[in-house]
């Protein structure tokens, strides 16, 4: 059973954004390669991947700043493939804020509404609402150069929300901020999105950001979707070696099936969970997260145990990361730093020989590389 790290939200039944076989080429390079997906109404959806994987290009096509070479883009059930950006029911928040430096906060937020020739009273009402929404009431007359990075990003967010878009697109909006501020704004964004019920499509290369905020994540690699699913599933049950490596840390162990639920590795023969069934002779990878590995001084009465040496110890404050060597293979094991007097707690030393246990239900079998 998957760990449930946050409350599950009820999303709308309708589809907010639908991509059908979308492809975008730049010269001979396929920046986005035949991507199809659906984002539900009211969902916090993240496009996650390394630089150059196609996530920002995909977002720019949804926004209308790029036109796909193939495929269709539907927003609210309407074909928007060739519709210009200003006629789409979306707004974009950029990494660079993109505020007008000669305008104050109020003028920046109101700019789009004035372009639509909205009545002054309605503009004033909406600007006041947006400022309150992002906790910047009282900052109306400030200029961007008089504000912190976090405050400027809030202004950019208010400017996008004041137009009441059906879909809000966010292109790595937190990446220019320091760690503490990013962590604070993550929570603010989550609460804001849930309060408004607007569909958010969020682009990031930060795995923790995506895991913390999203309902679902599409992990992208080389223009395609490697895996798409709920946050817990992406982390706990990676389908490819790329996803296992990119989302957090993972130990990957080559294995060959000798029975439907038994594999042979260089570390020994391991039994698998009852949910796994392999064909004898099949070659697979076993993935296990560092925090799911257990270490012992005495041999435990558990399956899948083997000896290893502590090669290095990395202290991070709240955790110890043990680098283990076993039959030439390096493994990572992560343990919380409890009080050393706590019963049952053990810490291990450099070069110490330890017993390692890989619980069958914590081993994830990766059978092949593939795409969603």
Image (cartoon, rainbow, N blue to C red):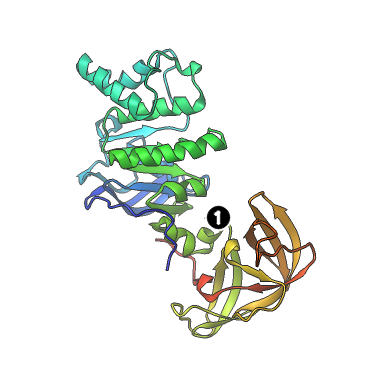
Q: Quadrant of residue 61?
A: top left
* Above-or-below relation of 8 to 64: below
* Above-or-below relation of 196 to 357: above
**Residue 145 seen in render:** yes
In the image, residue 221 lies at what x, y percent? 48, 53
In the image, residue 245 lies at what x, y percent? 56, 58
Q: Quadrant of residue 141?
A: top left
Circle 1: is it few (<14), some (14-19), or many (20+) Cα within 10 Å?
A: some
Q: Quadrant of the N terminus?
A: bottom left
| Residue nearest the viewer, comparing 206 with 57 | 206
Q: Which residue: 63% across, 60% down? A: 334
| Residue nearest the viewer, comparing 63 with 144 | 144
Q: Which residue: 36% across, 35% down? A: 65
Residue of label 1: 248
**Residue 20 seen in render:** no
Q: Quadrant of the C terminus?
A: bottom left
| Residue nearest the viewer, comparing 58 with 125 | 125
* Element class at badge 1: loop
In the image, residue 178 lies at what x, y percent? 56, 34
In the rendered structure, the answer to whether residue 189 lies left or right of residue 112 reads right
Q: How many marks?
A: 1
In the image, residue 174 lies at what x, y percent? 48, 36
In the rendered structure, the answer to whether residue 249 lies left or right of residue 41 reads right
């Amino acid at each position: 059973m998957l760990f449930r790290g946050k409350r599950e939200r009820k999303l709308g039944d309708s589809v907010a954004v639908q991509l059908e076989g979308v492809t975008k080429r730049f010269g001979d390079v396929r920046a986005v390669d035949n991507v199809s997906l659906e984002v539900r109404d009211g969902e916090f959806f993240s496009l996650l991947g390394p630089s150059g994987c196609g996530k920002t290009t995909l977002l720019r096509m949804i926004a209308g700043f790029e036109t796909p070479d193939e495929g269709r883009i539907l927003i609210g059930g309407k074909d928007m493939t060739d519709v210009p950006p200003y006629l789409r029911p979306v707004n974009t928040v950029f990494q660079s804020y993109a505020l007008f430096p000669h305008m104050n906060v109020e003028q920046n937020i109101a700019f789009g509404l004035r372009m639509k020739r909205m009545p002054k009273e309605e503009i004033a009402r909406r600007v006041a609402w947006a400022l309150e929404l992002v906790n910047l009431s009282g900052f109306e007359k400030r200029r961007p150069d008089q504000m912190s990075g976090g405050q400027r990003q809030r202004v950019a967010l208010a400017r996008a929300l004041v137009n009441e878009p059906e879909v809000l697109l966010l292109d790595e909006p937190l990446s220019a901020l320091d760690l503490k501020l990013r962590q604070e704004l993550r929570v603010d964004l989550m609460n804001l999105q849930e309060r408004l019920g607007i569909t958010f499509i969020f682009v990031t290369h930060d795995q923790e950001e995506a895991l913390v905020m999203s309902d679902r994540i599409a992990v992208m690699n080389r223009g395609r979707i490697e895996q798409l699913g709920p946050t817990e599933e992406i982390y706990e049950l990676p389908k490819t070696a790329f996803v296992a490596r990119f989302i957090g840390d993972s130990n990957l162990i080559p294995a060959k099936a000798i029975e439907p639920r038994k594999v042979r590795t260089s570390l020994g023969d391991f039994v698998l969970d009852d949910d796994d069934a392999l064909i004898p002779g099949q070659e697979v990878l076993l993935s296990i997260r560092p925090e799911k590995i257990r270490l012992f001084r005495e041999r435990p009465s558990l399956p899948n145990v083997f000896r290893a040496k502590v090669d290095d110890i990395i202290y991070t404050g709240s955790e110890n990361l043990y680098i283990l060597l076993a039959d030439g293979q390096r493994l990572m094991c992560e343990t919380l730093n409890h009080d050393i007097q706590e019963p049952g707690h053990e810490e291990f030393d450099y070069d110490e020989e330890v017993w390692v246990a890989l619980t069958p239900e914590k081993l994830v079998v990766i059978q092949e590389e593939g795409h969603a």
